[in-house]
Structures are given as C-alpha cells and as structure tokens.
Amino acid sequence: MAEQRVERRLAAILAGDVAGYSRLMGVDEEGTLSRLNAHRREFLEPKIADYRGRIVKRTGDGVLIEFASAVDATRCAVEIQRGMIERNAPVPQDKRIELRIGIHVGDIIIEDGDIFGDGVNIAARLEGIAQPGGICISEDAYRQVHGKLDTNCSKTAAQRELRDRLCPRSPQLRFCPFRT
C-alpha cells in the first residue's frame, strides 16, 4: 500500500490569546464577549487582512494565523498591540482586553484547511509566555525580521531559561519580546 504524502510548507505562524480571559469572563461574560467581538470585527480582522494573514482557527479567546512572511506577521502583531493600547485607553484597567502574541517561522502540515506540527506548537508556547500586550518571537522569526522593522527586540537570561525548559531540543530558539 502506498503511503499518502502530507502537504507541508514553510510559514510564519502567529498564535494569540486574551490575557486574563477567564477572569474577565468571570466578572462580566456578556460584556467581555461583546468587547472582544467588537475588537475582532472592527480592528483585528481588518488588520490581519491588511498583512495578508489567514485566520486558521479561533478558540474562544485564542487565534491561530498563518502568514507567508515573517515580516508581515510581525508588523501585523506590532500594529495590533499598538492599536489595542489606543482602543483600551478609555477602558478601566480591570476590563481591558490585552493580547499576548507568539510568532514562529517553521515547517507546518496542512490538512483540511487546518495547520499542525512543531511550527504551530512553538508559536503557541511563545504566546503562552508573552506578557500581556507583548509579542515573543523565535530566533527563526527574528532572523527573518531583523533590520526590517522599526521596533526593538531584547533577550534576557530568564527567557533563555524558559527556552531550555520549554524547548530543550531547540537550542537555537530565542524568545524576543517586542516593546510597543
């Protein structure tokens, strides 16, 4: 029996979620969902389209987006975080919707419009350690965007420890939070 080949491609993967979503929902489910949907409809989805991103899936407060370019993915993320600062300015601190974003460039598997593989898993891990309002990118993504963005990136010892704990098989991985 012939083995079926899977479809693969190199892509920039952006994983994002709402920081403190469970707390926000616990305080005001309907208001939180209404605000999140307004952000998606009025700001996030148009911004993603501006940078040619494809929303692969949404998971409640999370999103997985595929880009053909690491530069486009990172520029989109920076503009989203900057825009969310403006959108949140009139909102009380305890009701703000703040996003965490992780970006990685890697090989992915495509099946029925969904994406899988280490490339997706690493982006999700980076999102999980990003600060609210922050962006963490892998070393692979950083190599693609270095010198092409008007944003600074820093690396700390704590991030190297996280790399070793979360991705021990990936010594080349560098966590790089952008300051917006």
Image: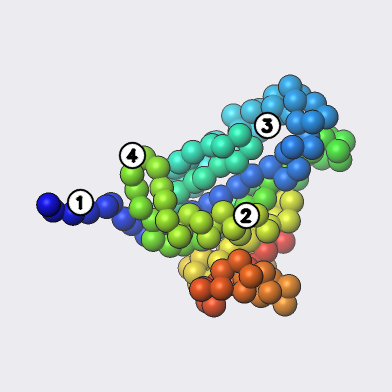
Label located before the other in sequence (1 or 4): 1
Give me the disc on residue 127: 2
x 62%, y 74%: residue: 164
x 28%, y 52%: residue: 7
Where residue 36 appears, x then y in whole percent? 68, 31
| Three-letter amino acid code at the position of disc 3 | Leu
- Residue beneath label 4, please? 112
Measured in 3D between alpha carbons, the distance from the residue under mark 4 to the one under mark 3, in whole angstroms, is 27 Å
Give me the disc on residue 36: 3
User: For numbered disc 1, what is the local secondary structure?
Assistant: loop
Q: Residues within 10 Å of mark 3 (few under 14, many from 20)?
A: some
Give me the disc on residue 4: 1
The answer to whether the residue labelled 1 contacts the one labelled 2, judged by CB atoms less than 8 Å apart, is no
Q: In which quadrant will I find the C terminus?
A: bottom right
Instruction: Answer left or right for 27 relative to 177.
Output: right
Label located before the other in sequence (3 or 1): 1
